[in-house]
Image (spheres, rainbow, N blue to C red):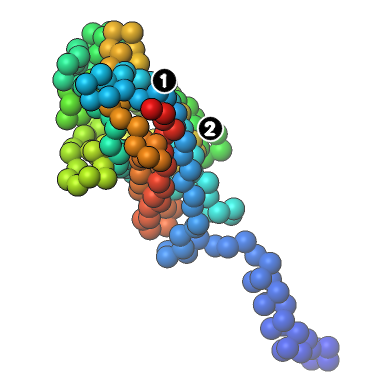
Amino acid sequence: MNKHRTPAAVVLAAVVAAALAAPPAQGQDDVPDTKLSTSAKAFPSKAGTKKRPRGLKIRASARIDVEPGYEPPIVTGVDILVGRGFAWNADRFVKCTKRTLDQRGPDGCPKQSIMGAAKITARADTIFTHPDMVFVNAGWKRTLAYTTLYRPALVRETIIVKRTKVPGRRWSHRESLRVPRTLQVVAGVPIQLVSARLEIGGKRYARDYIASTSCPRGGWRYRVTAYYLFATDARGEDTVDGSIPCRR
């Protein structure tokens, strides 16, 4: 018989110490802290009026930061509330259809229907991938975002960005998109968005696709909500308010 037994108190202390030192395990109900940050600018920032709208270009960026030790989430959708002071004149310009994009890509659409682009950075297991988006005019009710992912496998999808009016005086309308499952998991690998940069409007052939009609106090306001799917199958969301600087 071993005469040098380890006292139970020592064993218990060792177990507690090991538990405290271990990194957090992602249990079924574990949802990490996340932070969504955004910024946006308009060119020009000088506002037009209802009688004399001024066409503009919007450049915007977004980033998602996640608590250390946790997997970033998959982004399943985005909603953007757009404040007063803008006019979307999509019905006045050349359009393209989802069917054409699905079959032929942006090259199959009239050049004058292309209104902007975005560059996305995302994690795909141990690598970073950089999907491209091309924004194509399909009328006031929707914009088409033709998305091309190159790694870990080639995927091309047309995402519909729906535009709906919002009652009340604070917001003008809502832009909503849902990410198709084919872009959430590719070749068995979750696609975890890190950041995005976009530019829309201000094209030479469609200068007032987006136009300013006033400069509200506090700037042109917006509210972004991102919807998440975590590695544990839990769901969550982040909402952030922002404004685009403007001057009268």
Residue positioned 53% across, 50% down in the render: 66
Q: Which residue is mark 1?
A: 44
Horizontal side of 67 relative to 153 (left or right) equals: right
Residue positioned 72% across, 77% down in the render: 14
Position above or below: 201 against 26: above
Mark 2 closeness class: few <14, some 14–19, many ≥20 residues within 10 Å: some
Quadrant the C terminus occupies = top left
Q: Which mark is residue 128?
A: 2
Residue positioned 47% across, 36% down in the render: 39
Mark 1 closeness class: few <14, some 14–19, many ≥20 residues within 10 Å: some
Position above or below: 227 against 185: below
Which of disc 2 and disc 1 is earlier in sequence?
1
Quadrant the N terminus occupies = bottom right
Position above or below: 20 against 37: below
Residue positioned 25% across, 32% down in the render: 161
Tag 1: residue type? Pro
Horizontal side of 79 relative to 96 (left or right) equals: right
Tag 2: residue type? Phe
Q: Which mark is residue 126?
A: none
Residue furthest toward the right?
A: 4
x, y percent for residue 52: 25, 18
Q: Note whether residue 130 is visible.
A: yes
Q: Are discs 1 and 2 less than 8 Å apart at CB?
A: no
